């Protein structure tokens, strides 16, 4: 996954394994002031916990989810 992101020129602030939690969203929200379009979480083949989804909405963090890496890439590039 990391190789794919690097080769695709997608900036990465952090990588985790497992469901998206509130702390992941809070970490991503730190980009909101610098580059709001980069205040996002790319969730590849994982669940987004309900609390994380709520916090993302409140903090204006976008969460993209997909079970196929190329679909996630397409969502990201369309967003940018």
Image (cartoon, rainbow, N blue to C red):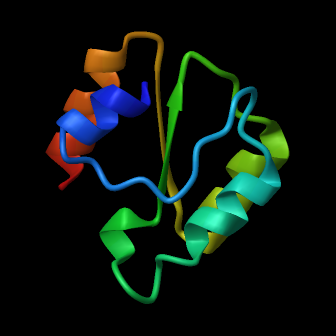
Q: Is residue 31 above or below residue 78?
A: below
Query: What residue is rendered at 37% in x and 65% in y?
Result: 38
Task: Give the total of numbered labels.
Answer: 0
The quadrant where residue 3 appears: top left
Pinpoint residue 24: horizontal percent, then vertical percent. 70, 54
Residue at the location (69% across, 47% down)?
53
Q: Quadrant of residue 73?
A: top left
Residue 52 in the image: state x and y as whole percent: 75, 49
Would you place residue 10 above or below residue 69 in this image?
A: below
Tell me if residue 19 comes above or below residue 23 in the rendering: above
Expressed as whole percent of the image width and height from the top left, the position of residue 4 reads 30, 27
Percent across and percent down for residue 25 are 67, 58
Q: In which quarter of the image is the C terminus?
A: bottom left
Image-based side of 63 in relation to 11, left or right: right
**Residue closest to the far bottom:** 33
- Quadrant where the N terminus sits is top left
**Along the line of sight, which residue is nearer the eye, 15 or 73?**
15
**Does 23 sit above or below residue 31?**
above
Q: Is 22 left, or right, of 15 in this rendering?
A: right
| Image point (66%, 66%), residue name | 27
């Amino acid at each position: 996954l990391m190789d794919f992101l690097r080769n695709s020129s997608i900036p990465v602030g952090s990588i985790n394994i497992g469901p998206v939690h509130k702390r992941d969203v809070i970490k991503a929200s730190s980009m909101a002031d610098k580059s709001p379009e980069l205040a996002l979480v790319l969730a590849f083949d994982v669940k987004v916990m309900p609390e994380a989804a709520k916090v993302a909405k409140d903090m204006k963090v976008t969460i993209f989810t997909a079970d196929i890496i190329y679909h996630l890439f397409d969502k990201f590039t369309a967003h940018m």
